[in-house]
Image (spheres, rainbow, N blue to C red):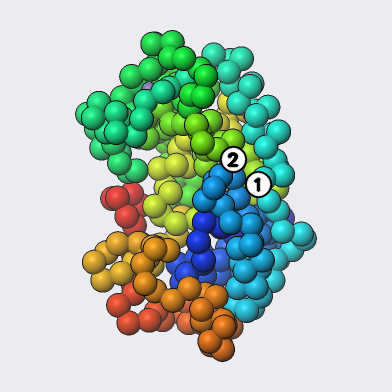
Amino acid sequence: MIVTRFAPSPNGPLHLGHAYAAVVAHDLARARGGRFLLRIEDIDGERSRAELAGEFEADLGWLGLAWDGPTLHQSDRLAAYAQAAQRLKAMGLLYPCQCTRAEVAEAATQMGPDGPVYPGTCRHRRADPTGAAWRLDVAKALALTGPLSWTDELAGEQETRPGLLGDVVLLRKDAPASYHLAATLDDAADGITLVTRGADLFAASHVHRLLQALLGLPVPTWHHHGLLVEPDGKKLAKRRNAPSLADRRRAGQDGPALADALRAHRFPAGISLASSLHGEP
Ligand SMILES: [Zn+2]
């Protein structure tokens, strides 16, 4: 049976781009008689605001999107993240890194889909592990697993190229786990069979496929959907002035009608759907 999830971070209110992502995940599950789950990705330290989880539930209900089972919370799963990281450390695949964001930008010679690619400065340096971030030695990991592939429903079969993002951080300095580690472990634990998310995270799936192979996790199918963008081509961002879903809900707008408009790709003036960002499919 197909299982999808909508997995917002409670760092700010949901906006139209989130509503579109939720509609896609919900409808793919419902169209195939499957389950649709709600997971709150609330491990972003001080940026996570607990009260927003309730707002997100109200937003989904207002849109007419019912989810199955209880709302899941990443903050309940910290032990699983630590355990997986310990396993990868024991395999010799993680190394500590004390580089700051500015140092990475300074040392990088390549730009990746998410900005400057970490050039591996600390890979052989034995940086002080106290308070360090821990990065995955991607080349060493891929040598261990051998070539891998994964399938996106829209873009087809992909040869796994985790090097696109460099040696990614799995344990952050300021949070219990990075998005890559937490989302991969949670999707496996929650039994997600179809990972839906925006095309801006396409490159991340190469890393997630590698983590699945290293940790012996089941491999889902992916569905990277288009993103709602503003006239300048930039992704709708939480920090910009667009009304949030909660604003629309409180103003008495018709939630199911909005969900239907998003399904039909009828967007408010100035907003359009970009099928890809960063040149990825
Ligand atoms: Zn470093």
**167 relative to 241, above or below:** above
Are circles 1 and 2 on residues that touch, CB within 8 Å? yes
Residue at the spot 40% in from the left edge and 43% down from the top edge: 203
Mark 2: which secondary structure?
helix
Q: What x and y, as percent, mark residue 255?
A: 57, 82
Q: What x and y, as percent, mark residue 64?
A: 64, 78
Residue at the spot 30% in from the left edge and 77% down from the top edge: 270
Question: In the drawing, does residue 156 fall left or right of residue 215?
Answer: left
Is ligand 1 within 8 Å of the beta carbon of the residue shown at mark 1?
no
Residue type indicated by callout 2? Ala
Of the numbered discs in the image, which one, if any, rests on residue 131?
A: none
Q: What x and y, as percent, mark residue 243?
A: 44, 76
Residue type indicated by callout 1? Gln
Q: Quadrant of residue 114?
A: top left
Q: What x and y, as percent, mark residue 205?
A: 47, 42
Q: Nearer the viewer, residue 227 or 79?
A: 79
Q: Label 2 neighbourhood size at 10 Å, few (<14), some (14-19), many (20+)?
A: many
Earlier sequence position, callout 1 versus callout 2: 1
Q: Label 1 neighbourhood size at 10 Å, few (<14), some (14-19), many (20+)?
A: many
**92 relative to 181, above or below:** above
Residue at the spot 52% in from the left edge and 75% down from the top edge: 245
Of the numbered discs in the image, which one, if any, rests on residue 182?
A: 2
Residue at the spot 52% in from the left edge and 56% down from the top edge: 11
